[in-house]
Amino acid sequence: MISERLKTLRENTKMNKKEFAAFLGMKYTTYNNYETGSREPSSDFLIMLSKKFDISIDYLMGLSEEREPSHYYTLKTSEFEHIKKYRALDEHGVAVVNWILNEEYSRSIEAKENFAEILTSIPYAYDLAASAGMGEYAMDIAHFEAVGLSETPPKGTDFLVSVSGNSMEPKFSDGDKVYIRRQEFVNEGEIGLFFLDGNVYIKKQGFAELLSLNPDYAPLPIAEYSSFKCFGKVLGKCHCKIIDL
């Protein structure tokens, strides 16, 4: 079939074999072997013909009656060889190759997106969920690890921490990541990260109490005998995914 398509293509140019071979920049004997079918054309030759005459490789190989090629991309020789092998696979082989291709495509795209998205890195208290509820364990045993972000944190940010619970809804929800600036106190009405009687909270500073934004939660009183400390001020919510470095 290739030899027949090749002959038709040459005859449409009104050239004989020697003229056509010279036009293609190849030896006459090589071209003659291709057109007579005594030798199978190389993939480089088919790609060259496809580009020179703007004709589909599938048409040249007799796999399609559509002469017009797809111009979405240009095949490399190695890619063309892979396609030939793919078309020779049975149903099981096609399914295996498709699965591997999809898995590797997803992994590669994700890796490229992660690399392109990283604008900065910041310490993240990965094992501490600051409570927006009933309280979490003390901050001094938290572990910090640098993570990448695809957005620029608010000016003055020192670290990132997760929110646990829903007492600060609608502003902060369970699982949100928030930016913290280290400081020893916040003004009344500001939201901070606090230590109170062995637990860590994200709350609003009240007068001698910590307040929730969710009305279902009662204030937490800061008594004179309480173990209380402010770790920092909440500067805002992280709106991007965290990327492991």
Image (spheres, grey):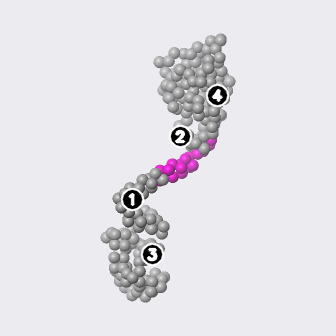
Q: Which mark is residue 141?
A: 4
Residue at 44% in and 86% down:
29
- State how many labels appear: 4
Sequence-wise, the earlier of marks 4 and 2 is 4
Residue 107 highlighted magenta (yes or no): yes
Sequence-wise, the earlier of marks 4 and 1 is 1
The residue indicated by pointer 3 is: 42
Element assignment for label 2: loop
Residue 131 highlighted magenta (yes or no): no
Foreground pick, 74 / 225: 225
Sequence-wise, the earlier of marks 4 and 3 is 3
Residue at 56% in and 42% down:
243
Residue 184 % position (x, y): 68, 24
Residue 97 in view of the camera: yes
Q: Quadrant of the C terminus?
A: top right
The residue indicated by pointer 1 is: 93
Foreground pick, 49 / 197: 197
Q: Nearer the viewer, mark 1 or mark 2?
A: 1
The residue indicated by pointer 2 is: 241
Gap between marks 4 and 2, in whole Å? Answer: 25 Å
Gap between marks 2 and 3, in whole Å? Answer: 48 Å
Gap between marks 4 and 1, in whole Å? Answer: 52 Å
Amino acid type at mark 3: Ser
Amino acid type at mark 2: Lys
Amino acid type at mark 4: Ile
Rendered image quadrant of residue 237: top right
Residue 52 in view of the camera: no
Amino acid type at mark 1: Gly
Q: Residues within 10 Å of mark 3 (few under 14, many from 20)?
A: few
Q: Nearer the viewer, mark 1 or mark 3?
A: 1
Gap between marks 4 and 3, in whole Å? Answer: 66 Å
Sequence-wise, the earlier of marks 1 and 2 is 1
